[in-house]
Amino acid sequence: MTHLPDTGYTPTAEDRASLDAWFEEYDAQSARRNIERMADMAVFPLNLVSDDSQGNARAAQWDREQFVATMTQVMGSGDEDITFESTRTPVFLSPAMAVVFTDSTMTMSGQKQRLRYADILVRRDGTWAFQTMIQGGWGDNL
């Protein structure tokens, strides 16, 4: 069993269910390449953390326009199905903040790609939104 850090907050069943529902919706929008709806599910400016090809950490902030443009370029506009099989491990810092670690397999056009990343989500007025995306290998694009 993996030991998770003690954040001083124990999530309720509703906390976990609402976070799981948010990711289910986000994955569905990603599979459809509905990038405008994906952007609706974020808080801008969005923080991004990665590393570059030289092995240096990089960080940036994107506005909605940059998110939509970059995600459109990365995800393409093809008609092929995209599916995600993900295992998520959320660490709730409070009822309104969670760091979520994800191990995922994305399948597109029959090709599988393994992904590992973390997101920081915040809940405002009962609705989750991602605020920070953390994933290795994208720093040259920041």
Image: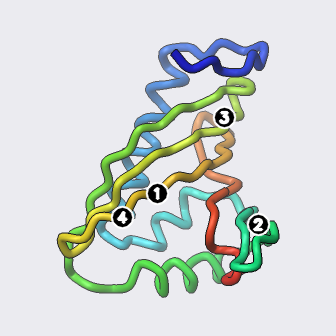
Measured as percent of width and height from the top left, residue 86 is found at 38, 44
Q: CA distance from mark 3 to mark 1?
A: 19 Å
Contact (CB < 8 A) between labels 2 and 4?
no
Where is mark 2, residue-wise? Answer: 45
Q: Secondary structure at mark 4?
A: strand
Q: Is residue 113 above or below residue 2?
A: below
Where is mark 1, residue-wise? Answer: 115
Looking at the image, residue 41 sits to the left or right of residue 99; the answer is: left
Amino acid carrying label 2: it is Pro
Depth check, mark 2 against mark 1: the one in front is 1
Q: Is residue 111 above or below residue 68?
A: above
Name the quadrant containing residue 53.
Answer: bottom right
Where is mark 3, residue-wise? Answer: 98
Is 139 or 67 nearer to us in this picture?
Answer: 139
Tell me how many marks there are. Answer: 4
Depth check, mark 3 against mark 1: the one in front is 1
Q: Secondary structure at mark 3?
A: strand
